[in-house]
Amino acid sequence: MAIRPIIRFPDPRLRVAAEPVTRFDADLRALADDLLDTMREAPGVGITAPHLGLPLRLVVLELAPGEVGVYVNPTVLEVSADTIRHVEGSVSMPGVTEEIERPARVTVRYRDLDGIERIEPAEGFRAVCHQHEIDQLDGIFWIDRLSRLKRDRLIARYNKLRRG
């Protein structure tokens, strides 16, 4: 287990769609462990392999201490019509957050570290986190969900933080 460097916005690798994982082996487990350690150090509640510059469809979530979920090749099967607003941010863009509207409930299909297919319904914060991280796997950085004005203001704030 190791803490790895996180790539930072505006690194173009954050906009690349990740490739499906095809090997469920010790290397995948080690990467998942490294993602967890890196996420905790950041700190954050979710991280993907693309945050480390690795174009693989792998997500680690820890929404409560010790409750770790590892999602390999996740996809959203269903979304609710009703929405919620939640403040989001990214380990690749530390120090800035903004409120984003997303479906309130989702159903996610994924594989676990053994390659076994699973289905997970999620609502509220968990649904938001799934959508946020799956967007990242699809090459959609979270600020793409903002209006152009909010996105431009957020990028300006982030750039100011980086310079300061």
Image (cartoon, helix red, strand yellow):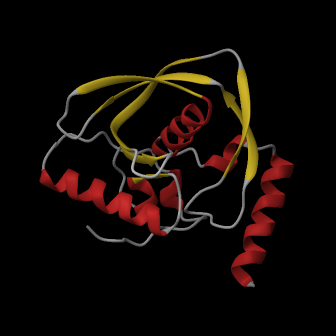
Residue depicted at x 63% and y 66% = 94
Examine the image and state in which quarter residue 93 appears: bottom right
Instruction: Say left or right for 145 vs 119.
Output: right
> Can you give x and y, in whole percent of width and height, for residue 144 in the image?
68, 45
Quadrant, the N terminus:
bottom left
User: 49 or 46, which lies in front?
Assistant: 46
> Can you give x and y, in whole percent of width and height, for residue 26 in the image?
13, 53
Residue depicted at x 63% and y 47% = 142
Residue at the far bottom: name it: 164
User: 55 or 77, which lies in front?
Assistant: 77
Is residue 146 shown above or below 119?
below
User: 69 or 99, which lies in front?
Assistant: 69
Instruction: Say left or right for 105 vs 25.
Output: right
> Can you give x and y, in whole percent of width and height, for residue 121 in the image?
47, 21
Numbered label tally: 0
Residue at the far front: name it: 65
Quadrant, the C terminus:
bottom right
Residue depicted at x 62% and y 16% = 80
Is residue 32 shown above or below 10?
above
Residue depicted at x 17% and y 37% = 114
> Can you give x and y, in whole percent of width and height, for residue 107 in the image?
47, 21
